[in-house]
Image: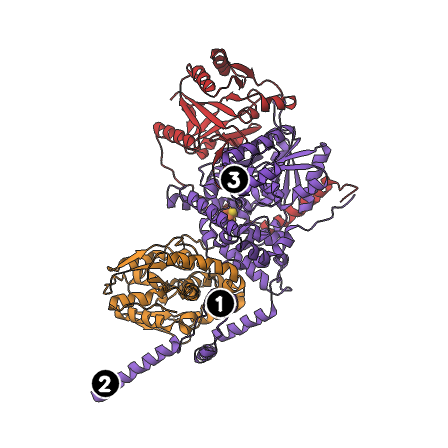
Amino acid sequence: MKHIIEEESKYAASAKAFRANVTRDLGNEELRSNFRGAMDYLMDKRKGAFSSEEELEVLREQCKLIKQRCLAKLPHLLEQLEGNLEKNGIKVHWAETITEANEIIAQLIAQKKGKSVVKGKSMVSEETALNDYLEERNVECLESDMGEYIVQLAKEHPSHIIMPAIHQNKKQVAKLFADNIEGFEYSTDVDTLIQQGREVLRNKFCQADVGISGVNFAVAETGTLCLVENEGNGRMCTTIPDLHIAITGIEKVIEHLADVPPLLSLLTRSATGQAISTYFNMINSPRKPGEKDGPQEVHLVLLDNGRSQAFADEELRQTLQCIRCGACMNHCPVYTRIGGHAYGTVYPGPIGKMISPHMLGLEATTNLPTASTLCGACGEVCPVKIPIPKILLRLRQESVKPKSQQPEVMKGQGAGRNNVEALIWKVWAQVHKSPKFYALSMWGLTRFRFLMPKKLGGWTSVRTAPKPAAATLHERINAKQKKAKQEKQSQHGRG
Amino acid sequence: MTNTKADIKAVSNTARGNILAKLKAEVNGADYDKLPKEIPYDYPEFSREENLAQFISELEKNHAQVIKTTKDNMAEVISEQLAALNITKLLYGDNDAHREIINALNSKIESQVYDFSIDNNKEMLFNECPAALSSSRCSIAATGSIVLWPDENEPRSLSLVPPVHFVIVDANKLHADFASLITAQQWQDKLPTNVVLISGPSKTADIQQTLAYGAHGPKALIVLLINI
Amino acid sequence: MQQLNTQHLRDYPKKPKQVYLFGTCIVDSFFPDTGMDAIELLEREGIEVIYPQGQSCCGQPAYNSGYKDEAKAVAMSQVKQFPLDIPVVVVSGSCGGMMRHHYLDLLGDDPEINNFCQRVFEFTEFLVHVLRLKPIDQGPKERVALHTSCAARREMGVHITGNKLISQLANVELVIHDYESECCGFGGTFAVKHADISAAMVADKSKHLVATDVVRYVSADHGCMMNINGALDYQKQSLRGEHIASYLLNRIKGNSSKGSL
Ligand code: SF4
């Protein structure tokens, strides 16, 4: 038997280039205004989607507990899901790595002699870089979500998990279509653009022999694959071709069908402010005898890719509560400034900072957990109440702890450790935990304030440097108390 | 690239074993009775009228056309709508109620029953079926959603491929919200091949957050609301 | 696990005779006037303020950089400085959030730590909810903006109290700036490690504050103000921020405010 040779995710390199990516994208005015506009729109939509703060909070608490319960039972639910799917006629495959997942899918397609694939939106297939893998094996893979289609035409990656082409404005899309679609006459009218995309893609749906989709919720109790979408391309991919392959992360399993409504409601409202998506598609089996459409075969690929590592730590496990709504990125001031591509990872924004280190290791992602002010805007809106800032803090700890320290919680632990920095913090702690040392250092800082440099690295490229006071608060209070005491004594003496 | 292929069954089995073992090691001995209680939001109860109003308003917000009509009038309404859209052909799911409507349609309208397998008829379905008529199982007021429960007589693509979708919705089968519907009908006991909730014509805001209708599915959703 | 949105709901004690003041390391070395003004304001309300000379820093800089052990050592040393069962008033929402919420996580949930955390109050929170201060405004008519730090807003939930205090000033009009709840881009070591992103953020924050056309903006956090004022100064803008303790004191005393940099 031939073993699978694991390929490194292409995202490892781009994530490592985070600093350079940031410099590139911060300087792109058009990109920045595209993101600001889009984020304003999405924040506004979400705000209008809840009848009251109370409704939102009760739902968030409920959904958090649902996801925590499902995670607490995760291995059992996965087994139950598998059992019920198989009973329904859906084949289940497991993959620990992205290459395993890709190879499984490639072979399923090959077995059916598939040549042409249409894909519904699936971030997990982006994670595995499935398109590249299939194309190398001469299978044509067409993205059918409008945003994904645009991104694919532009030879880019999604910059947002819900709205993949959010970094482009309509002028850019118009140019892209004009350059790539034969017979398309340049127009910035969005309806015209969408109709053009519709025409191209409907032809493909009609011809494709394989449909690939993601999964939003996999219900263990019934063996149901749920898909949330507006465009209808997800339904096309899962209804028209003969073979449907769904791929998802192991954390997407939920226990009961009754868990779906609250999660669905928070998902769509948090994502785009919609009470519900246009389509909520629940797939339970392949085509049954007598039925006139639907795929003859349905497969589900369950992917780990670092998720079990997050699972093994109780705090980090909360990362897996995520239902991929994108609200954290919509509200993130860093994401709004640098956009989705700068992260270099499949999942950008706060969720990406939390999950990518498990997928790519901390070596490739050291810059992600630190690229946050910990302002908490993400945690405030997260529908499943993941304490995102806390998890970022935890990742920072894992990143700077000694490489050899046990237990090893994460791949690449200690990758961000710098001995000079570590020493500085040691000294800092010595100074600040000892009142004497602290007083001495403050005395020095204030007395020698004229020595304070006028330039402080990046700080002073846009700001002036702060000036230490002439005397510290400690000293001023001391002096004040002394004075008060003297006054009291002299009064006493006179009296 | 691999010349000899890895055995994906073996790969999957090994992966399965490893993943489950890792996960189980973490939750071994967990006491699931001790999980905190989950409390759903207590929505106020609405009257039938309020639910209906909510249902219609949500659908209309999402650009669906809602036409209040009656069983006897449906053929006329559909005929009018098709004429207005310049459509002369209607695909329909095979059941008695539909046949009755079809028989009463304006004679200029050609009708076709969906009694063929999709396999050799994709081109026809995609290119020669401008409109479709389907029934629905029930509907949901809170989100303006129509529940379709496709079967051999009403295939899944009936409500998906033709650009105009007429759907008959019985006001007596309106439920307040998705959660109460699932519980009331005990969905977990028996689900068909596919269930779909439809809440408007297909749409996208993928280009500069500008909403456009008719992405890949129907461009128009026309709801024939009966038994009001 | 703490829950961001509800964790600031708490029961408030009656007005005490004594309080501790936690000055924060930034105020200690850069803005001692703020500390002095806070004390004067509290003393005017008849409260004795104890300032333990052994205090230094809440430990947040190390904590936020991932150096948990170092943060822990400093945090523990601070808890020991405030043994009496009286409120610890902190003139920063950010340090307040650290001491009120993160200490539990850092130092373990034992009774002493828990008791300490329960006693921590952010300055404006203390004025509004414990002192029930109704400031009598003696200052001239003016318009100000208010910037609330992210920790004050999201960990302590005290954006409301800052707003309330300013709104009670009879001669002051509070102007809300665009993207009011958005972070100024400070984030401690973030401003150094990711200086360019931080710069983009503070550019926007200062732009939105300047656009309000006020002469002063007020904040209860010197971290943010060091960032924003530094940027304003660099841009040669006249607008400056002033700590809310100083601002309130000046309004009550009828002095005109000065702004701190
Ligand atoms: S982390 Fe929370 S807010 Fe972000 S995508 Fe996941 S569920 Fe949504």
Gap between marks 3 and 2, in whole Å?
79 Å
The three-letter code of the residue at mark 3 reads: Asp
Q: Residues within 10 Å of mark 3 (few under 14, many from 20)?
A: many
Q: Residue A250: x, y in percent?
A: 60, 44
B141 versus A489 height, above or below: above
Give the camera-side residue of B174 and B222: B222
Please identify the quarter of the rendering in which residue A185 is found: top right
Give, as a three-letter code, the residue at label 1: Thr
Residue A341 versus residue A406: which sits nearer the camera? Answer: A341
The hue of chain C in the figure is: orange
Q: Position of residue B111 (x, y in %)?
A: 54, 15
Contact (CB < 8 A) between labels 3 and 2? no
Q: Which chain is home to disc 1?
A: A
Quarter holding the C terminus of chain C is bottom left
Image mark for residue A460: 1
Which mark is in front, 1 or 2? Answer: 1
